[in-house]
Amino acid sequence: MLFSIDEQDYSSSFDGSKKGFQHNKGNLIKLFPFATELKELPESSLDLINFYGISGKFHRSCLGMEQTSLLPKDQLIQLIVDEVDAGPNKEDLEDIIAELLFDKNEHLILFSFQVLPHLGFQWPNAKLKNLENFICNLLIDDEVEKIIENTISDNAPNNILYQLVLDKFKNITNKGVSTYNRNGYYEGPLVKEIRDLFKEDLSNLIQNKALFTEKVSTLIKFYYFQYILKLIAQLSNLFSDNPRPGLFYFSLDWEKLSKSRLAIDNGWRKLEKLVEPMFAHANCLELLHTIQSSEGRFLKKCFTYSEILTDIQQMDEESEKGLTVVVNKIINRYRDSIKDTDWSDFDAKYKIPEGKTYSYYHSTSLIHKLYSMIKYQFEKSYTRRAAYRSFNAWYKEFVKLNYYKSRGSLGGTLKLDKEGLLLFTEMSIMSSGKDKILTSHLWLQLERRGILLDNQSKREVVNFFEKINILEKKSDSGDAQYVTRLYNR
């Protein structure tokens, strides 16, 4: 098998500017949904917390709907008031409608699951639009679409005001349109793992329409969070013979911690370290996606290091040597393009990692070198360092807004609040197909969803469950403790 650089792909991704070579955040492979500048991040905070805009796009995508325009709060209220004869009490009616339909952040109250497809962003911008497309591609498949279609097609609410609201929203949506595509999106085993877990919880959540309406945005947000978390852990291993598992410990936001707790070093602190080279991984894999073989693309689908290694292991010796030559050409081309970096310092310090994979397959050692070069120049470059940090800052800020708690001198931890604990406890019990679950099985179900708790946190959880009366003890010793469902009781 012969390998070469696809010059058209290379040019479109890296040489499309009059300024010469420019790093790319995702053209051939959309690995992350982030930007290299922070201009719109502060104003996106509320939307990154409630995730209503993302949830709206998710539901519209499942239903083949598209918003043709926005319907702000004042305009919606005016359209409703115009439907009735308020007389001299028009302003009073407007105030009453505003109070009934909108929360303190002026976001529409989720009065029915049928309002979900009509949710939008508080502050729409290009970065949020990119994020919503990314999440739809991550979580939606044919089965998810059917789940949503079957739910939204149920009867409309009886409340006349709510019917009026839904009627106004129907006037700004089109049906039967394609609202997203999967071109350039990674579809590896990790995507399937996350999507299957999400699908399992979505199917269970939808059995309670009121709970679904209230929590589906939380569910979408959580699985996006977990996917990026697991992806960066996977990428950090590259071709290691002994990959480190991507395990992250959470703490409960109401408990006190000491510095010896697992959540201190194996939570936020670990995440923050792994997140740093996101932009380096994105560019390394973008460069590798410019490689083509005599049989077409290097790999037929978008790939990460995991798929590269699998393909290399199946190559004959001559093919692997051919890939090695092309990766070396990319390295030399990259080195020549980045003229403001002291490469002699890099050469003096760089060492190929130990391990059978790196020693046996020369192409993997060169790919590691390419990644290390990209990371090195970002860290050393005065002009490009800001973009490097901004790229990962989008995810770090999202985590801080939703899953982070400051612990003073101990730093920060990933947090699990009571709302999240109860939701994923409910999902865990429902996954078992029963109305209660052993606490030992609960920990395993939570771990499946990426929520790890140490023994002290588990004791805090048990105490909390006992206080809210959803804990059953089958023996005085406490060996057999069950957690019962909280909702639908």
Image (spheres, rainbow, N blue to C red):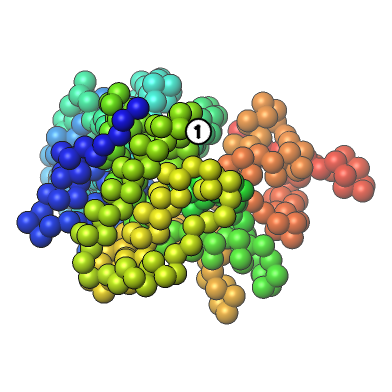
* Percent position of residue 180, x then y: 25, 31
Tell me which residue sits at (45%, 29%) in the image: 315
* Percent position of residue 46, x then y: 33, 57
Residue 441, placed above or below residue 203: below
Q: Quadrant of the N terminus?
A: top left
Q: Which residue is mark 1?
A: 313
Tell me which residue sits at (75%, 43%) in the image: 439
The answer to which quarter of the image holds residue 204 is top right
Asked whether, in this view, residue 334 is left or right of residue 143, the answer is left
Camera-nearest residue between 285 and 468: 285
The answer to which quarter of the image holds residue 179 is top left
Tell me which residue sits at (22%, 70%) in the image: 340
Tell me which residue sits at (72%, 34%) in the image: 436
Camera-nearest residue between 336 and 188: 336
Asked whether, in this view, residue 153 is left or right of residue 383, the answer is right
Q: How many labels sit on residues?
A: 1
The residue lying furthest to the front in this view is 318
Q: Secondary structure at mark 1?
A: helix
* Percent position of residue 168, x then y: 19, 34
